[in-house]
Structures are given as C-alpha cells and as structure tokens.
Image (cartoon, grey):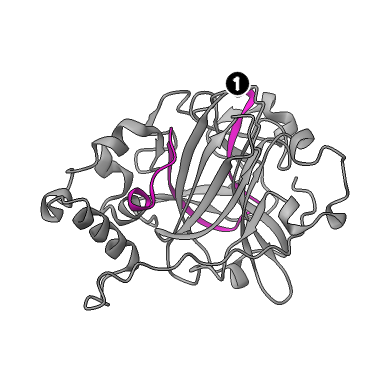
Amino acid sequence: MIGFRGCQERAAWCAMDQRFPTMPSLPAPILILLATLLLAGGGCCTALRPGAGHSALRQSLILHASFDHGLDADFAVGPRGLSNAPSMQQRDAAVAGLPAGGEVRLAPGEGRFGDALRFTRRESPLVFFSGDRNAGYRGSGWSGTVSFWLRVDPAAELAPGYCDPIQITPRSWNDASFFVEFEKRTNDVPFRLGAYADFAVWNPANRKWDDMTAAEKPLLTAPEGPFGAGRWTHVAFTFDHFNTGRDDGMARLYLDGVPAGTIGPRRQTYTWDEARCLIMLGVGYLGLWDELALFDRALTPSEIAAVYALPHGIADLR
C-alpha cells in the first residue's frame, strides 16, 4: 500500500522562545502563546478564558472528528461519514464505518479527549473521510492546517517498515499528497512530513529516488519526536502558498505545539480531483488515534500552540 521511501534529510528544531526564563514549569507551547499575547498588547487572562479568543480558529475550522459521539465527524463542510475500503484502488467499494474484522475499533474512554480509534493490525482495510470540500482544496492560493493526536511507542508498538498515521491525496503517496510517516528501522524510528506536489512537478525527469539529493525531495525528518509509551503527542502541519505557480510553497511541522521543521520554499502544484481525495487515517499504523481537525488556512505558530493547549480539544472552539 505504501511504496519504498528513503530520506537523509534532517530538519533542525526551531529555537525556543525564552521570554519567560523564570517560569520553567510551564510547557513551551504555553510560553509561546503567552508571549505572543503579551507582545500584542492583549490581556492574556481574558484571552485564555475557556471559549474566549478563538473566533478566528472557529471560523477557519472545516472538519472536526472527535470520535466521542460515534465515528462520523462532529462537524464538516463536506461529507461527515467515516468509511472503509479494501484499498485506495478499491475506494468505490467503500462502506460506512470501521472494518468488520476489528482491525480498527472505537476505544471508549481511551482518547486524548474522550474516545479514540485504536489501530490493531498493520494489514488493514483503508479507513478514511472524504476530502471533498473537507480538505479545503483551492486551485490557486491554497493554504491549510491538519491537526491530530497520536499515542504510540514507535519502537515497541509499530511494525517494521513504513506507516502513515495520516495521508491525504486523490492519487498516491508521492503524487499530490500530504502525509506524516514513521519508518521503523533496526536502530531507530524517524518521523517525517511529506508534502509532494504533482509527480511531474517535483520529479519532472522521473529520476530514481536514490539518485536525488535530500534538497530535491519534498520531505523533512523531524528531530527525535516526543512519542513514547503512555503519552499523547500532538501532531500538526500547515501549508501555505500552494498552487501559486511560483517557488514559494511552504509546509511546516509542529510536535506538541512546537515547530519541528519546514519544507520549502518550493513549487507546490497540486492538481486534484477533489471529489476523489481521501483523508486516510492510520495506514499501516498501530496505536491510538484521536481528534482530527482541518482548517482552511495555515495557522500561525501561536495558534498551533493554542490548539495544543485547548483543555477539551477542538470542542472548545465550537
């Protein structure tokens, strides 16, 4: 289901904001958020009240699936239903809900907030939401954000090889696609973000992967991630200036609200048949999965930190 990928690229952690050296007990994303609010001249106590200061996030939300009220999305601008199919190539055989064999099941009370999905078998039918309108696709000047939570010990729980906790595309992992992936090797388990334009755009000469330099590949490897046994990790990525026809597209990865690297600037042309796009969850993944949210613009670093810090998850925006 997932082709071979290699990567030697390493992305450096962005420097942490040190404006609050006397408050080391606060998590870094909270410090970033407080610093942004104070520098903007806002009253932080008012902005951090539950439900306050989130109108811009609320207006930008286009899909939210908490799995707390069933399998379907709590909110969506397109189709709300969660479906499964034997494979991407057999998407037209999709049926509503989770696979009948139990490869993926609802996990009551085990989520980061409420319930979650538990992926139990690497070889599993495809589980997905439709990307039709839910991915916010635009043929020009496209931007967006994807946010979710994972609970996994990569070294102990994942199977050898690749898995994509999320993959969004109408075609293939390397053709007009977004994904994050783990690659479990004998010595480590790197975590990556991929933002692959149309194949003919990012690899016009159809060169072999091993012959390409790291800079030529629209892929970043994060530093050692905050994944581990018994802990939830927030994963988010943003993309901006896609489908401009210029070499100005940027994609950014965040882990637990903190910047973890960038892809770009580069030409990011995505030619989608939006109705065929799938938002695929847990491709080859083993572990818990919760709280999917998509936004129709690239959130700022302070907004990513705010999403990470929401006491009850995306429900606090609604």
- Is residue 299 on the magenta stretch? yes
Q: Residue at x 74, y 48 (%)?
A: 2
Query: On the rendered structure, is 163 left or right of 223?
Result: right
Q: Residue at x 27, y 55 (%)?
A: 36
Q: Nearer the viewer, residue 56 or 74?
A: 56
Question: Where residue 193 appears, x then y in whole percent?
Answer: 60, 53
Mark 1 Cα shell of 10 Å, populated few (<14), some (14-19), many (≥20): few
- Is residue 235 on the magenta stretch? no
Query: On the rendered structure, is 173 left or right of 75?
Result: right
Residue 286 appears in which quarter of the rendering?
bottom right
Question: Where residue 83 appears, x then y in whole percent?
Answer: 56, 32
Amino acid at circle 1: Ala
Quadrant of the snapshot with the N terminus: top right
Q: Nearer the viewer, residue 223 or 88?
A: 223
Quadrant of the snapshot with the C terminus: top left
The range drawn in magenta is 275-304
Query: On the rendered structure, is 313 left or right of 83?
Result: left
Position of 210 relative to 224 (above/below): above
Question: Where residue 155 appears, x then y in whole percent?
Answer: 62, 72
Q: Residue at x 75, y 51 (%)?
A: 216
Residue 21 appears in which quarter of the rendering?
bottom left
Residue on which the image places disc 1:
275
Asked which secondary structure carries label 1, the reply is: helix
